[in-house]
Image: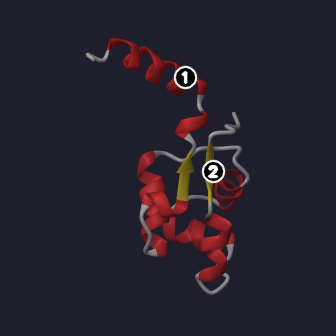
Amino acid sequence: MKSEFISNKIRTQRFFAGEMTQQELADKTGVTRQTIVAIENGKYFPTLELSFRIAYVFGKTLEEVFAYKADEDPVLIKLKKSKDKTKPL
């Protein structure tokens, strides 16, 4: 399941980590190369634990590797609107 609201910078991080291969990242994080390929292409979303591992390998925070466009997610937009209506003046 692909999401238009979640993205990652794994390819960029691999480049800046001495052009680390997908296999090297897979070995360091304990998954298969195919898993890394699927994550990079947005076809698979890693668990929170794997997300932390990936960020750790690069010496980055989750936010530096993964991004979530909350301001574009219709579910969160609807939630925000409903909260705004219940705010006291």
Tell me: 42 left or right of 68.
right
Outermost residue, bottom direction? 18
Q: Nearer the viewer, mark 2 or mark 1?
A: 1
Q: Quadrant of residue 59?
A: bottom left
The residue carrying pointer 2 sits among few (fewer than 14), some (14 to 19) or many (20 or more) residues within 10 Å by Cα, namely: some
Which quadrant, please, contains the N terminus?
Answer: top right
Which of the marked residues, 2 or 1, is nearer the chain's N terminus? 2
Q: Which mark is residue 75?
A: 1
Percent of width and height locating residue 43: 71, 44
The answer to whether residue 60 is above or below residue 44 is below
Residue 73, horizontal then vertical, whole percent: 59, 31
Which residue lies at the image location 52% right of the left edge and 19% below the top edge? Answer: 78
Dot label at residue 42: none
**Which residue, given by chain and number where applicable, does mark 2 sit on?**
7
Q: Of helix, strand and loop, which one carries label 1?
A: helix
Q: Residue furthest left?
A: 88
Residue at figure coordinates x 53%, y 62% from the top left: 65
Three-letter code, disc 1: Val
Q: Nearer the viewer, residue 5 or 19?
A: 5
Residue 64 left/right relative to 38 = left
Q: Nearer the viewer, residue 33 or 1?
A: 1
Tell me the distance, in whole angstroms, between the alpha carbons under discs 2 and 1. Answer: 17 Å
Relative depth, front residue between 26 and 88 = 88
* Residue at image location 60% in from the left, 25% down from the top: 74
The secondary structure type at the circle numbered 2 is: strand
Q: Nearer the viewer, residue 19 or 84?
A: 84
